[in-house]
Amino acid sequence: MRPASPAISDTIAAIGLAIGGAMGLVGTFVESASLRETLWTIDGVALVVATALLTMKYQRLGNDCVAAGFLTFLAGESLLLVGNAAGLEASVPSYVGGISLWAAALVMVSAPKTFALWMRLTAVVAAVLFVVSVGLILWGAPLLPTSAPLPAAGYPFLVLTFIGWIWTLLKPDR
């Protein structure tokens, strides 16, 4: 017997997470503002689509905390999209709101034992790094979305979490 194929919505969500993770990371390191804004816009739309589908999936499964986490991530990503075209400096207020919601979302998705431990740990590390970044910005540190070490140190942990979610979505049922 052949293993069941993932649902089309799971495949679309996995593609959205992959596009979002890749474009987001690449956008962080490009010098051109217009290219960065383009990559981050693609990233943002892909992640909104993915997290909308994941919200529906986990709500149907009765996993309210995970569903609410993905919905919260969608709200945070929407805030990031709003500020994107304004440029790095002007986007900081919406960026702070967006990564604050990302942090909350990552904790909400990771609180139940829905995903493997390593995914939950990478999500929590990303969340902590984003919360520290938010605190620094709110207390006057001149950080931009591309600043290193923070907030940039959180992005690889976020993308590792996405990779885990993609694997979970696409793995054959056993």
Image (tube, helix red, strand yellow):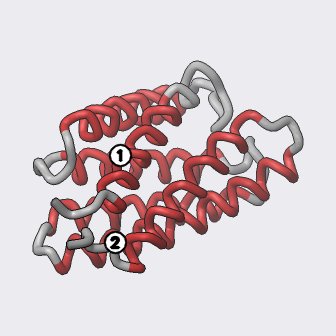
Dot 2: what SS? loop
Q: Residues within 10 Å of mark 1 (few under 14, many from 20)?
A: some
Q: Residue at x 70, y 41 (%)?
A: 26
Relative to 113, is 58 above or below?
below
Residue 2: quarter of image: bottom left
Dot 1: what SS? helix
Q: In the figure, is residue 144 to the left or right of 2?
A: right
Instruction: State the image coordinates of residue 141 (x, y, percent, origin top left).
Output: 58, 24
Instruction: State the image coordinates of residue 173 (x, y, percent, origin top left).
Output: 20, 63
Q: Who is closer to the viewer here, 166 or 89?
A: 166
Relative to 10, is 94 above or below?
above
Q: Which mark is residue 6?
A: 2
Q: Residue at x 30, y 55 (%)?
A: 168
Q: CA distance from mark 1 to mark 2?
A: 15 Å
Find the residue positioned furthest to the top. Answer: 149
The kind of residue tagged 1 is Gly
Looking at the rendered image, the disc whose residue lies closer to the viewer, 1 or 2, is: 2
- Going from N to C along the chain, the mark reached first, 1 or 2, is 2
Q: In the figure, is residue 167 to the left or right of 19?
A: left
Q: Residue at x 35, y 37 (%)?
A: 127
Q: Residues within 10 Å of mark 2 (few under 14, many from 20)?
A: some
Instruction: State the image coordinates of residue 103 (x, y, percent, origin top left).
Output: 36, 44
Relative to 139, is 41 above or below?
below
Q: In the figure, is residue 108 to the left or right of 146?
A: left
Q: Residue at x 85, y 35 (%)?
A: 31
The kind of residue tagged 2 is Pro
Relative to 61, is 24 above or below?
above
Residue under label 1, please give it.
164
Q: Who is closer to the viewer here, 166 or 90?
A: 166
Q: Quadrant of the N terminus?
A: bottom left
Instruction: State the image coordinates of residue 43 (x, y, percent, origin top left).
Output: 62, 58
Q: Who is closer to the viewer here, 161 or 127?
A: 161
